Image: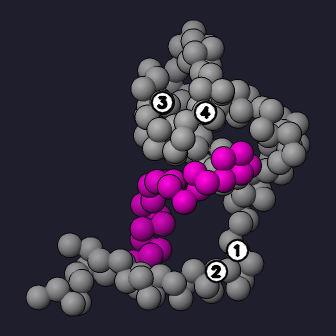
């Protein structure tokens, strides 16, 4: 069973930080949203409905126009933001038709991390790693085939 070598992972994470690579995705996303949608870090809290619509549009291309419109209309930013925990917000989102785990996690990343509307949710984010990230972690020695301490 694969094992995460936390010591090696911390070394790699520090090297990425030292190279200035941490936070690049957040900066890129904020710049894109500011230039394309006129949503900045300062105004994002007032645009949660718009952020939802954008994430759904980007991630759920297979929805018909009608299903997309119904989904956007049924979303309530105040209901989401009133949730005490990220897990409660995740449950709210995934209870909606056409919202799966991946889309819910992506949207909550915007709310918790990218725009820090609910920064306390960032530590709870469960963003699945894609295949390329896993392959890179294996090549860097962060993921090993078996726990060396297991008997």
Q: CA distance from mark 1 to mark 4?
A: 33 Å
Q: CA distance from mark 1 to mark 2?
A: 5 Å
Which badge, 3 or 1, is on the more N-terminal residue? Answer: 1
Per the image, the residue denoted by label 4 is 82
The image quadrant of residue 15 is: bottom right
Q: Residue at x 52, y 37 (%)?
A: 89
Per the image, the residue denoted by label 3 is 92
Mark 4: secondary structure: loop
Q: Is residue 23 left or right of residue 80?
A: right
Q: Residue at x 52, y 44 (%)?
A: 85
The reply to whether discs 1 and 4 touch (Cβ–Cβ < 8 Å) is no
Which badge, 3 or 4, is on the more N-terminal residue? Answer: 4
Which badge, 1 or 2, is on the more N-terminal residue? Answer: 2
* Mark 1 burial class by Cα count in 10 Å: few <14, some 14-19, many 20+: few
- State which mark lies toward you, 4 or 2: 4
Q: CA distance from mark 3 to mark 1?
A: 33 Å
The verdict on residue 133 being magenta is yes
Q: CA distance from mark 4 to mark 2?
A: 35 Å
Dot label at residue 16 = 2
Mark 3: secondary structure: helix
């Amino acid at each position: 069973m694969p094992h995460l070598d936390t010591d090696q992972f911390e070394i790699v994470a520090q090297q990425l930080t030292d190279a200035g690579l941490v936070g690049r995705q957040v900066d890129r996303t904020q710049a894109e949203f500011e230039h394309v949608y006129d949503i900045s870090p300062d105004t994002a809290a007032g645009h949660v409905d718009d952020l939802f619509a954008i994430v759904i549009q980007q991630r759920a291309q297979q929805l018909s126009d009608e299903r997309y419109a119904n989904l956007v209309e049924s979303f309530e930013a105040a209901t989401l933001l009133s949730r005490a925990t990220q897990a409660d917000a995740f449950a709210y989102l995934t209870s909606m038709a056409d919202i799966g785990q991946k889309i819910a996690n992506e949207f909550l990343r915007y709310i918790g991390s990218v725009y820090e509307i609910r920064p306390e949710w960032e530590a709870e984010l469960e963003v699945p790693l894609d295949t390329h990230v896993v392959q890179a972690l294996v090549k860097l020695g962060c993921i090993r085939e078996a726990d060396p301490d297991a008997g």
